[in-house]
Image (cartoon, rainbow, N blue to C red):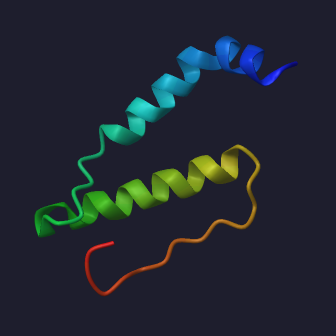
Amino acid sequence: MKSIELIEKNKSRFLDELLELLRIPSVSADPQHKDDMINAAYWLENHLKGIGLDNVTIHSTPGHP
């Protein structure tokens, strides 16, 4: 299957996954959203592992990422 065909076939799923991530209010400059930033990082980590990437790690930072 060509890349364009794969994208068209899965377009709805790809958009749903992107919107799910974007719904997490992960505003790194707002300390009120620190937990949301962590949730977004774990969401992305799990998603990347779910699509087959096996070398995925989360790195904490002392300040805003």
Please state the total of marks drawn on the protein image. 0
In this rendering, position of residue 64 left or right of residue 58: left
**Residue 38 place in picture, x, y as percent:** 36, 64
Which quadrant of the view contains residue 61?
Answer: bottom left
Q: Quadrant of the C terminus?
A: bottom left
Q: With respect to residue 21, does 16 lie above or below?
A: above
In this rendering, position of residue 63 left or right of residue 52: left
In this rendering, position of residue 60 left or right of residue 54: left
**Residue 57 place in picture, x, y as percent:** 59, 71
In this rendering, position of residue 49 left or right of residue 30: right
Q: Nearer the viewer, residue 17 or 65?
A: 65
Which quadrant of the view contains residue 54?
Answer: bottom right
- Residue at image x 76%, y 49%? 52
Q: With respect to residue 52, does 64 lie above or below?
A: below
- Residue at image x 26%, y 64%? 35
- Residue at image x 68%, y 53%? 49
Q: Quadrant of the N terminus?
A: top right
Q: Nearer the viewer, residue 63 or 54?
A: 63
Residue lying furthest bottom in this view? Answer: 62
**Residue 17 place in picture, x, y as percent:** 50, 32
